[in-house]
Image (cartoon, rainbow, N blue to C red):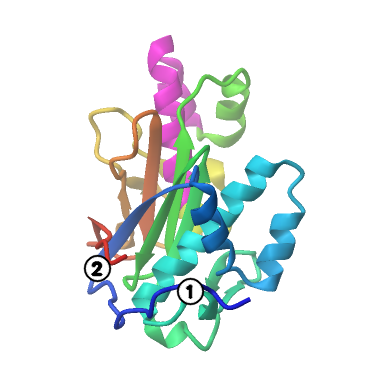
Amino acid sequence: MTPTADPPPRPALPQGGEVWCHWLRLDLPEEEWERLGEFLSPEELARAGRFQFPGGRRRFVAARGQLRAALGRCLGIPPAAVAITTEDRGKPVLAPESAPSGLHFNLSHSGDAALLAITRAGPVGADLEQVRPLAEMDGLVTRFFSAGEQSAFARLAAAEKPPAFFRLWTRKEAWLKATGVGITRGLDQVEVTFQPDAPARLLGLPVGAGDPRDWTLNEPCAPEGFLAAVAVRHPYAQLLSAPDRR
């Protein structure tokens, strides 16, 4: 099926240390959802078909379709022509035919919201989470946070713990996604700031992972009820709202 999209504009790429942040809605009208579905590759459509529940399938199609639309605008090509592959650890990246653009991207979604970060500054990771009480929060803190973070977390008032937990989680996960490692390893070895009045910053990395000062960690202004983080391997990266060129 031929995508029903307007002719793409000329390429427009982030410059220097810019990181373009796109806030995406996933609860889209039926006609928009169907239009975005036309952008997906056969592999993505097959993956969408494996979702057990319609809501999950619709959110996946909305997120991947908007990802392709944004990358297509950057590259000056139709969304369906954007070639996406995965690294050995499963991180989505541009395929070799688009790699000369120097674009790095990362997508995260929670509920009906998503955050897409696009940059040429270096590898980038984004994480978005809806702040909510978790019955297993204390166990997760013990399992995934460093001894110092556990001690500081335990001193917080009960009302402060959910946002503090998700600040810790999103900031660690953003760095792990940027590196392609993911939460299966190293989460307790990545130390970050998480106090409400402290700017987002990497404090420590796993042995052999380099200097935290080589990275920029930021907390973009997320929709109400959400927290987010973006990590990029560049010491002076700057988060910007993506230009609206639709």
Q: Which residue is drawn at 55% across and 69% down?
A: 39
Give the quarter of the image for residue 128: top left
Give residue 224's position: percent from left, percent from top.
Answer: 34, 30
Q: What residue type is labelled 2?
A: Gly
Circle 2 residues within 10 Å: few <14, some 14–19, many ≥20? some
Looking at the rendering, in which quadrant would you find the N terminus? bottom right
Above or below for 215 versus 9: above
Which residues make up the magenta segment? 147-174
Looking at the rendering, in which quadrant would you find the C terminus? bottom left
Give residue 24's position: percent from left, percent from top.
Answer: 41, 50
- Magenta region includes residue 168: yes
Residue 191 seen anywhere in this rendered image of the structure: yes
- Magenta region includes residue 156: yes
Secondary structure of the residue carrying numbered label 2: loop
Residue 205 seen anywhere in this rendered image of the structure: no
Q: Which residue is drawn at 64% across and 41% down?
A: 55
Q: Residue 17 carries which label?
A: 2
Location of mark 1 (residue): 79
Give residue 201's position: percent from left, percent from top.
Answer: 31, 45
Circle 1 residues within 10 Å: few <14, some 14–19, many ≥20? many
Q: Earlier in the sequence, mark 1 or mark 2?
A: 2
Q: Residue 223 carries which label?
A: none
Magenta region's main secondary structure?
helix
Above or below for 95 versus 181: below
